[in-house]
Amino acid sequence: MKTVEIVERIEGEAKLSCIWKNNIVSDARIDFLNFRGFEYILEGKSPLDALVYTPRICGICGQAHLKATVDALENIYQNINEPLQVTNKAKLLREIGLNIEIIDSHIKWFYMFILPDIVKLDTNDLGIYTPLKGLRWLEACKNASETIKALAVIGGQWPHTSYMMPGGVVSDPTLLELSSMQNYIYGAIRFFEQSISGVPFDKYLSFDSVNDLEYLKGDLKYFKDLSFKYSLEEYGKSYDRFITLGSSFLFESGKMRQRIAHRLDLSKIKESDEHTFLFENDKLNKQKTTWSKSVSYDNKFFETGPLSRAMMSNRKFIKNIHKSYKDSSFTRIMARMDELAFLLENTKELIKKVDISEESFIKPIISLKDIENARGSSVIEACRGSLFHEIYIEKGKISKYDVITPTVWNLGPENKTQKGIAQKAIIGAPSIEIARIVLRSFDVCSVCTTH
């Protein structure tokens, strides 16, 4: 038996095809059918134009695309031996902005995409988690919206901010504005404490054992209890291989198969278009099924995202949950909500470090439009995982722009030797409802994937 359905309530939409044998999924395929073309749009444009275009690749993680772009442009200066001077203030404001965007995304993902589906396994009455009218659903939306205002303080707007520039940021917050940002963060901390974890914030941050799951109250306890009732700790397992390309004040880069290695060789990242539409008439080719490419590191598929970051950064609570339940949907979801707490704590501390007396922006001596031939690349951590940007300039114009998003890592198609990460994770699901939860545990972003 085969089932095919369009999965919505994600960023964009995807087609999930499942083959069933003895009432479990024996094979699965995830296809992305909407093409957007940002990489082609950027060809021939001024390099600085990318700062306006790439944040519009996605309405959820535009800040991540902006930072990836500015880092790639600054890498061009590095590669022509004209490195830019960027103040600590500018670096902090960039990271604070990215953190806030990830915080906003984590809250919305849990309450809009994950909890409703898991609650539906148990009852058709979603109660306080009912979309658009449930008490907790509305509280979560309000807290996410209030938190993202902290980003608008330094970005001027959200989404699609463009306040980062090669050389710094075009933002100069006052002490009053920084205090306002702190207030927004403290509001999100209170929401995490009172509604998400149900335990004092400092106590949650001290969790380091799988046994600490028993102390959870609030919505994470409800999630945990339903997860074990419906065996989500058994489903959603893939290769148990992880990669984190970017590093920050909170995250460490590296990869893990049996053990962690913190050295990465970005030349080992390879894209494949074996199953990818490259032109409209490719849809007549039965081997081509999706606009998504696949990407591997050293010829292996690796999972990226909050679970990978927890493993690389040695967050003991999640590492010990992983020891018990491996890369299951339960572990993956817990890792993301755990990351939310640490992002809130980290962002609160980073705001304190901003020195308003420092310059926000130091203008480059050389204009990008005067550069004859150069290449730049960057890797950062977005809400869903590792994001890679690469830009080539010829005669002051963009000749090529390449974007590899987290969803390409996690939900790209299989190749000749191995299933894709999410594809493998879905195999073994006992129902279409569980298959959907496994898929959403990766936080699908169709629009980033088919950029």
Image (cartoon, rainbow, N blue to C red):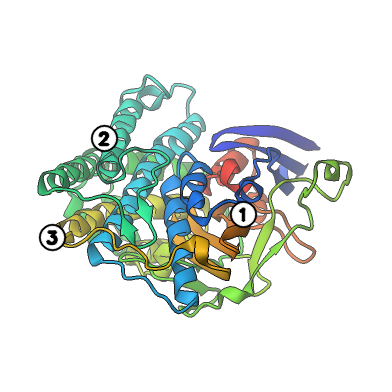
Of the image marks 2 and 3, the number of the one nearer the N terminus:
2
| Residue 153, visible in the rendered structure | yes
* Residue type of the residue flagged with mark 3: Ser
Query: Farthest residue toward the front?
Result: 370
Which residue position holds label 3?
357
| Residue 304, visible in the rendered structure | no
Measured Cα–Cα span from mark 1 to mark 2: 30 Å
Image position, residue 354 (x, y; %): 18, 59
Q: Residues within 10 Å of mark 1 (few under 14, many from 20)?
A: many
Which residue position holds label 2?
146
Which residue position holds label 1?
408
* Residue type of the residue flagged with mark 2: Glu
User: Quarter of the image containing the N terminus?
Assistant: top right
Query: Of residues 156 and 146, which is closer to you in this image?
Result: 156
Q: Quadrant of residue 294?
A: bottom right
Q: Secondary structure at mark 2?
A: helix
